[in-house]
Image (spheres, grey):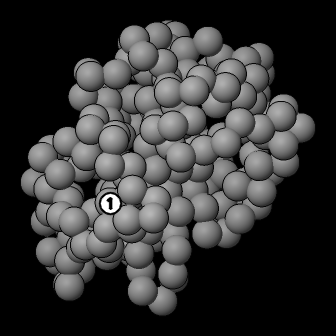
């Protein structure tokens, strides 16, 4: 999404930066991992295809795609993290929120913590809440949903138990749950996110 291409989102332990060309090498490496491909229901891409995908995500007005940086690995001595230039070694994963239907104000959340050393540390909860806050307050999203394979127990636990999403559909042919968090009124979404 071009209108958020200069925006960084900040949490206590994470920094979300727009997915740029300097992140391609790490992202491509992550997406060769069979377990990540399985968990994300993805197919491996060539580097050329990955470049095309990054450009399409950047230019798609319905997608907000960020790379997660772990704050504990950032050098913020200047007051601002250096997120430009060479490939960053401290990328922890990819976060993508896809706004599916603007008139219905809904968005799909896709979260991936690619580096195994950064999993099971609460970053997924912080990441989802940070992105939901941005979506609710800046994009006026009132329904967030996720699609998760029935074998991806970590993601199911994250969204069901920790974030309170509820099942709204199941696609037997894909073995995939759809979970949602929705509010009928804007005030309810604000309260849900701030709690």
**Quadrant position of residue 37:** top right
Residue closest to the far bottom = 103
* Badge 1: residue crowd in 10 Å (few <14, some 14–19, many ≥20): many
* Residue at the (44%, 43%) spot, across then down: 111
Q: Is 160 drawn above or below residue 144 in the view shown?
A: above
Give the image location of residue 42, x and y in percent. Answer: 60, 44
The foreground one among 99 and 69 is 99
Q: Is 86 drawn above or below residue 103 in the view shown?
A: above
In the rendered image, the quadrant that contains the N terminus is bottom right
Task: Please indicate whether residue 70 sits to the left or right of residue 12 in the image.
Answer: right
* Residue at the (84%, 32%) spot, across then down: 47
In the rendered image, the quadrant that contains the C terminus is bottom left
* Residue at the (20%, 77%) spot, across then down: 183
Q: Is 192 drawn above or below residue 34 in the view shown?
A: below
The residue indicated by pointer 1 is 177
The foreground one among 14 and 95 is 95
Task: Please indicate whether residue 164 sits to the left or right of residue 99 in the image.
Answer: left
* Residue at the (77%, 38%) spot, across then down: 45
The foreground one among 15 and 101 is 101
Give the image location of residue 29, x and y in percent. Answer: 68, 21
């Amino acid at each position: 999404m071009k209108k958020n291409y200069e925006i960084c989102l900040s949490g206590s332990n994470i920094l979300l930066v727009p997915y740029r060309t300097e992140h391609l090498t790490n992202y491509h490496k992550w997406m060769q991992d069979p377990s990540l491909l399985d968990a994300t229901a993805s197919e491996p891409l060539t580097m050329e295809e990955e470049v095309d995908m990054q450009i399409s995500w950047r230019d798609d007005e319905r997608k907000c795609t960020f790379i997660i940086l772990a704050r504990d690995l950032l050098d913020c001595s200047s007051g601002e993290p250096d997120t430009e230039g060479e490939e960053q070694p401290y990328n922890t994963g990819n976060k993508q929120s896809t706004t599916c239907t603007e008139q219905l104000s809904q968005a799909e959340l896709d979260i991936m913590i690619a580096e195994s050393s950064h999993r099971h540390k609460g970053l997924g909860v912080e990441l989802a809440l940070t992105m939901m806050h941005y979506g609710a307050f800046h994009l006026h999203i009132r329904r967030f949903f996720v699609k998760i394979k029935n074998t991806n127990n970590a993601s199911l636990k994250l969204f069901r138990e920790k974030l309170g999403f509820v099942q709204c559909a199941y696609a037997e042919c894909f073995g995939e749950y759809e979970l949602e968090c929705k509010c009928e009124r804007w005030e309810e979404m604000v309260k849900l996110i701030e709690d």
